Amino acid sequence: MGRGVKVAVIGGVFAVMVGGAGYGAYNVVSALDGGGGSGAAGASVKSGPPSGDEVEETAQKFFAAWEKGDAVTAASHTNNASVATTLLTAYGEEAHISGVEITPSAAAGASVPFTVKAKVAYEGTTKPLTYKSTLKVVRGETSGRALVDWQPSVVHPSLKDGDTLVTEESATPQIEAVGRDGEVLTKERYPSLGPVLATLRERYGAEAGGTPGVELVVRHTAQDAPDSPLLTLSKGEPGKLRTTLSAGVQAAAEKAVKRYGESSVVAVRPSTGEVLAVANNRADGFNAAFQGRVAPGSTMKIITAAMLIDNGVTSMNEPAPCPDTATWQSQTFKNLTGMEPNEGATLANTFMRSCNTGFIKLVDEDPLSDSSLTQEAQERFGLGRDDWQTGIVSFDGRVPASDGPDRAANAIGQGEVQMNPLNMASVTATAITGEFRQPYLVSSDLDDREFATAKGLPQSTAAQLKQMMRLTATQGTGRPAMAGLGGDIGAKTGSAEVDGQTTSNSWFTGFRNDVAAAAMTEEGGHGGDAAGPIVADVLRAGG
């Protein structure tokens, strides 16, 4: 900014004043009240949407002040001047961005797209910076003025509330993340890995042996998240960090999640617990594949079936009748529309058709209790104990002991159960091997962290679960999605109703040889219809 910035105190409020430019008292007051001054005494206040001329004029004034580095004047043309001043001041002083040239495109109604060209200069190093953003012009609620609707994304599209821009020597060295076969993994080639790589750098940058560089970053002051690099001025020396990811499987996962919005997938190697791929297609950048907490629907029946077998309630070829409805403590549960009842069904038949009522009718059998499903999940599948050490932030599931209707709902993946694709890929891996191997992205040799352990499943239980999943993939609800996949395959479908959504979340988990994968999407409804093809594509690449 560099324009004689001074700080004045007016009525106990700090305001930034720019000296020498004839910047008057009206604008100081306007900056303090968000551009909400009412204008001349007795003047009528305009209402309604801004006209095309007002949109153009407001955008031009905002851009002109921004280009000059005049944060206060630019902010006075917004509807949140105090917050805008802080970020626009940091743009010059903390991010060291100067030489700003803004080129607006044709307005679309009240929205004005624009391109920013600037430079970032720090300790003798200068790099060009170019990006696109959009602003919207609205009518001030009290002033009637046409004002820029303030959003941090106006300044840069990567900014959210509470974020700021900073250019400085990086707190941790950059990493060169490599896959299991030595391929370099970058967010440019694998966009879903952006948040994952940022977290890996935050945790392992120093251990990987690199030296810090200088970067322009988004500092997420409002979230517990690592800085997000935008521009590298000097690289330093990246440290090499070996991960378990497979470039080929990751590429398939990246492509597969593009099928549906708000979708996530994880692939693991059951024999080792190594994570082969993690991908998300989400506008918010959240790593739902590892951190999501949502009901898993009927994929939960893998754990429920294991509980029934381990407690001697039934087994694969023993009865699990599938009536039209089942009532548990005054709540009635139904099956998917069109499912034919089968009072003579075995557990295998009920499992592969994903019959809800067959599982509901068995959850009150002796010796089961309110905590039986919780114990099965924790002791056999390693879930719900908050002790997984994957290498990045992850959630390891929640299967609480529940009474009342939730005890039955939990058994079919509704109620209070929470999972994510990482959890369900691990469930499948445990089910088909009988061994719980905690999933991980980075070897524990790097930081001596302790992996979670669990006792796993009796081999007879694992053999039955694996066979029931095979039947589901070849004869049951998973057949359409898994068609055409060779090798040893198995699957389980699921759909979960979520409050506020018009369609159910789609879930699918499956295996092919020594690869297990699970996916969830908020679009597409039934598991085989949406999440199923995502998992099949990943298994095709990795299995």
Image (cartoon, rainbow, N blue to C red):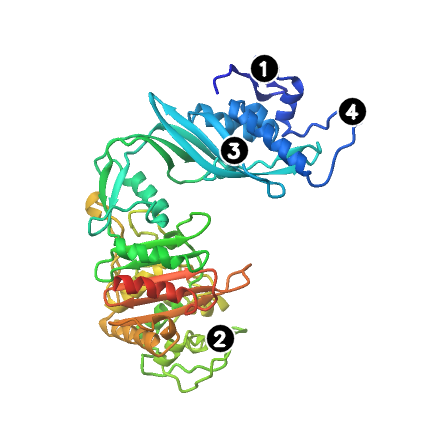
Instruction: Specify the label residue 184 is tagged with.
Output: none
Of tags 1 and 2, which is closer to the observer?
1
* Outermost right residue: 42
> Which SS class for mark 2?
loop
Q: Quadrant of residue 35?
A: top right
Q: Which residue is mark 2?
A: 336
**Lateral position of residue 17 relative to residue 304, left or right:** right
* Mark 2 residue type: Leu
Q: Check disc 2: other Cα within 10 Å, few if <14, some if 14-19, many if 20+.
A: few
2 vs 4, front mark: 4
SS at mark 1 in the image = loop
Which residue lies at the image location 25% right of the left edge and 64% below the top edge? Answer: 543
Q: Position of residue 156 (x, y in %)?
A: 47, 36
Q: Nearer the viewer, mark 1 or mark 3?
A: 3
- Residue 366 appears in which quarter of the rendering? bottom left
For residue 412, above or below residue 92: below
Residue 396 visible (yes or no): no
Q: Which residue is mark 1?
A: 21
2 or 3: tag closer to the N-terminus = 3
Q: Nearer the viewer, residue 513 or 483?
A: 483
| Kind of residue at badge 4 | Ala
Q: CA distance from mark 2 to mark 4?
A: 67 Å
Along the viewing direction, whichever of 20 and 164 lies nearer the viewer: 20
> Which class describes the residues within 10 Å of circle 1: few (<14), some (14-19), or many (20+)?
few
